[in-house]
Structure formats: structure tokens, C-alpha cells
Image (tube, coloured by chain):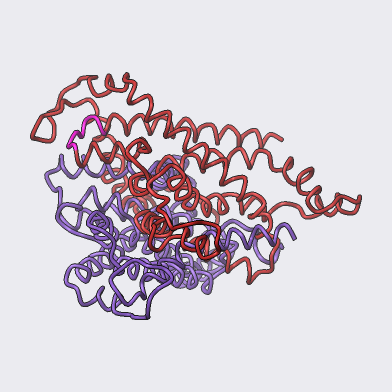
Amino acid sequence: MIARGLQILVALFLAAPLAVVLGVSVNEKQSLTFPPEGFSLAWYAQIFADDGWRAALINSILLAASAATIATSIALPLAWFLWRRIAPWARLVQGLGLAPFILPPVITALGFLTFWATAGLYGQAWTAAVSHGIFFTTLPLVTLTLGFSTIDRSLTEAAATMGATGGQVFRTVILPLIRPYLISGFAFAFVLSLNEYIVAYMTVGFVMETLPIKIFNALRYGYTPTMAAVSVLFVAVAAAAFGLIAWLGDLPRLMGAPAEEDR
Amino acid sequence: MKPERPRTAADFAPIAYPAAMLLVFFAIPFATMIAVSFFQREAGAFYTPAFVFDNYARFASAFFAKVLGFSLGLALLVAAICVAVAFPLAHGIARLGRRAQVAWLIALLSVLSLSEVIIGFAWSTLFSRTAGITNLLVALGMMERAQALTPGFGAVLTGMVYQALPYAVLVLYPALARLDPSLTEAARSMGASPARAFATVVVPACRNTIDASLVMVFVFALGSYLLPQILGRPSHWTLSVLITDQAIYQSNMPFAAAMAVLLVLVTLSLVALVTLIGRREGAQ
């Protein structure tokens, strides 16, 4: 009873601001009123029709896709090495991969700003992709480490006994088994990069706008329903990505619950 | 195949690229930031290399002490509220059916991944005069006329709790999902009500988990850099906001870097504390 009541209260608390934003986003007039007056999807069309918003959307998607690719490309060989080899010093590299996530984000952001400025590369679009790629390495690293831990080592042993080379074992046995964890890690990094503000702002904020930067810059000149439409779009993308992760694998397990057969 | 020690160059090859990337693009930027914190600020330019303690000396001001105290106090308050709500919530979620658990986890992850910009925008809308929650109260006859609830301390606190609550639930979830259900069952069979069994059996059994997650949510809340700006007044700015402000708007990178180093030290000592708590748990 009490547990159910608490769940309903928290669900309302989590949904309330999103419901208001959803209402504002379908307002017919360009005013921020709730409940909405009339119904219109014009503000959603605005994201694609307006040059500024469309450019920010394209920048954000390109940034998130390249960042997630870089993050998984770092995490996959690292997690594989940690699983395959006995090398205590490799924990240091693992620690470097986890650190950006433990520290307050503004610190990592400032590190990148001073680094790119010192290197004379400040403001180039690719520096944001590399920065985000490093910043979000933690996510695929965590999902892949968990993925490798679920692999039955006798499988790879059997393949090796049958004469498969290391590369063949990786491609034919390991890769299919960890694919869901690979996709999950990519999706996590993609969604978080899409939403990230401070690192993107400190690396390329003066020359390029991503959607969060565009929303924040626009906030200073007043509210528009387009911001609400973009926010709704973001919530939808996040829910779709995490839905995909849940569909691909065992989400409770991924978040730390015991394996289903042990429950 | 059992884990083996790497011997040949080919054995080491897979870790070369991740190690190089993380060293060049994380360790070196971090070191650069520490170096910059000792540099001399140059008016009109970024900075010039030097080795001065001027930037650290600026910490010894009443203004800075106030900001630091406010940041720590606010983060502590957020952590306490979040853990107090998240603990019974995570316990309840871990006992739901599988489909409901998955639905909760998707919802929590979706809110957690939301940009601070969007959370700030959503709450400032909810707290606004024209589209805000006060309109609802007016409609219900509980208020005379709608009013804006932002900027203000309550708005900052609400926004930060909103941001950190999903994190707190997800931090507590693994431990509560692994909690032995026979503990509560035993208490229940002895005649304890569910609430009593929860308070007298579950909570004491999870003391260390609660302590550790308090510290983790505290560190998470310390990182909030936009919500105090969007939902609060300058007097509600935290250390993270001040670092951003100095680096971007005041172009004082050395001072921003020095504050960041201080924030790292605070964070690391807290992480060390969590590790100690973990050890204590392991020893039991």
C-alpha cells in the first residue's frame, strides 16, 4: 500500500514537468500557456524548417554518432583485454576510462577546454567528437565488461581446441555473444552525448550549436514553443533507446539486479 | 579459455589504442588543467605559463567561502532528500514484476539522461506564471492568482532533486534487488507489519549501502552546473556554476582551473570515503 502510493507520487513528480512541456509544445499560439490553447504540430515542423534549429539538430546527431563510435571503439578492445589477460596494471587504464563519469562534468569539460586551447585546436568540430567519445567511454566499458563476464570461457576454449585462431574466436564466438552489450553501450553513449551541454559548450560552443546549446542560448531571449517541441523529441529518443536496450537484453541485470535464473 | 598473462607484442596490441586514447585525451587534458591553475592570468588573452599561487590565494575570501559552503550544503540537502525517497522506492521497484521493473528502469534512465538544459527549461515552465502549477491551484480555488515560483531557492532545490532522484534509485537498485527476501519474510511471519519490517529489518541491513549512496548522490549533485543558473538567482550559484562562469564569461581560466582542482580534491576524498565504506561492508 505505502509502496504503491510512493511509486505513484514519484511517477507524478517525474512526469509533471514533461507533461507541461508536452502541452506547451502543441500550443497553437506562440505563447507559453498551459493547458494548451488549440492544437498544432507547427512547432515540431519548425525544428526541421528553421535553418538554425535544423543545423543544431544535424550537429547534435553527427556529434552523438561519432562520439558513441569513438567511445565503443575504445571500450571494446579494453574490455576484451581485461577479460582475456591477467594484467593488474591494465586496471589503471580501466580507471582512466571510468574516471570521467565519477568526476563532476565541469571538471572534464574544463580539462578539454585548456587542452584544446593549449594545443591550438580550439573550436574545431572534431575536437567535440573526441571529447565526448572519451567522456562517455565509461558507458560501453561498463556494459561490455558485464557482457564479457557472462561469456562461458569453455566455449572459446572449445573453439581454440578445434583450431580457431584468436581472431577467428573473437569474430565467430565472442562478438555474437557480446553484440547486445555492444549495442547497449553505443545507445547509452549516443543518448547521453545528444543531451550533453557543458563539454560541448566548452569545446565548440562559440563556433557551433548543438541542440542543448541552442536551447540554452535561446532561453536567454525568452521562451518559444519550439524549445518544448525539441525537449519532447529528446525524451522520446531517450525512451526509444532505453526501450531498445531492454528489448535486446536483460535491463534489470544490466542495472545490477541478479541474473534472471537466480531470482 | 582461461585468462593468461600477455607475453608477445600481439598479446598487448588490443590495449594499445584504448590506453593511448585515454592517456592523450583524458590524462593529459587533466594535467593541463592542473598546470593552468598555476598560470598567470593575462588580461585580454588566455593566460601565460608561470608558477604562481595567486589563483589559489583567491579562495581565502568571504565570498568564496560562502559559495563553497552553499554548494556543499545544497548538495547534501539534495542527497538526503533523494536517498530518503529513493531507498523505499528502489526497494518497492525491485519487488515488482519483471515488466513493471523494466518500465520503471526505462523511465528512470530516460529522465536521468535528460539534458540539464531541458530539465531547467521544463521546471521553469512548470514554475512560470502563465503555464505553471499555480494555475492549477487557482483553478482548484486554493490560490487567488497565478504567480511565478522561479527564480528562487525552492525552484533550484526541486530541479536538482528531479535530476538526482533517478540516479539515487539506480545507485540503490542493485543492492536492494539482491537483498535476501527471507529477511523480511521472517519479520513478517513474526507478526511485524510491512512498514515495521521495512524500518526494523531492511533499513538496518542496508546501512552501508545507504551511506555509500548518500556520498555518491552528493558528488552527483555537486556537478550540477546549469540548474542553479536557470532556476535560481546569482546568490544560489554553486561552485560548478562559478567555474563555468569564470572559464567562459570572465575568461579567467587559471582561476576556473584552480576551483576545478579544489572540486576534484573534494570529490576524490568523498570517493575514497565510499571505498572505505565498501571495505567495511566487505569485512562484515
Above-or-below relation of A211 to B172: below
Residue A158 is drawn in which quadrant?
bottom right
Q: Which residues are magenta?
A: B250-256
- Give the vertical position of B102 relative to B250 (above or below): below
Residue A99 location (% of width, % of height): 40, 43
Q: Which corner quadrant holds the C terminus of chain A?
A: bottom right
- Left/right of residue A166 with respect to residue A226 in the rendered view: right
The colour one sees for chain A in the rendered image is purple
Q: Is residue A46 magenta?
A: no
Residue B143: x percent and y percent? 51, 56
Q: Find chain B in the image and tell me its colour.
A: red
Looking at the image, which is closer to me, A18 or A118?
A18
Front residue of A1 and B129: B129
The answer to whether B190 appears left or right of B91 in the picture is: right
Residue A169 appears in the figure:
no
> In the rendered image, is residue B28 in sight?
yes
Name the residue: 55% across, 36% down: B274
Quarter occupied by residue B115: bottom left
Please name the residue shown 51% across and 36% down the image: B76
Q: Residue furthest front?
A: B144
Image quarter (top left, top right, bottom left or bottom right) of the N terminus of chain A: bottom right
Specify the quadrant of the image occupied by residue B37: top left
Q: Residue furthest left?
A: B44
Total labels drawn: 0
Query: Residue A56, position in %: x, y?
Result: 22, 65
- Is residue B255 found inside the magenta-colored segment of the image? yes
Could you say where residue A24 lies in the image, as x and y percent from the top left? 38, 69
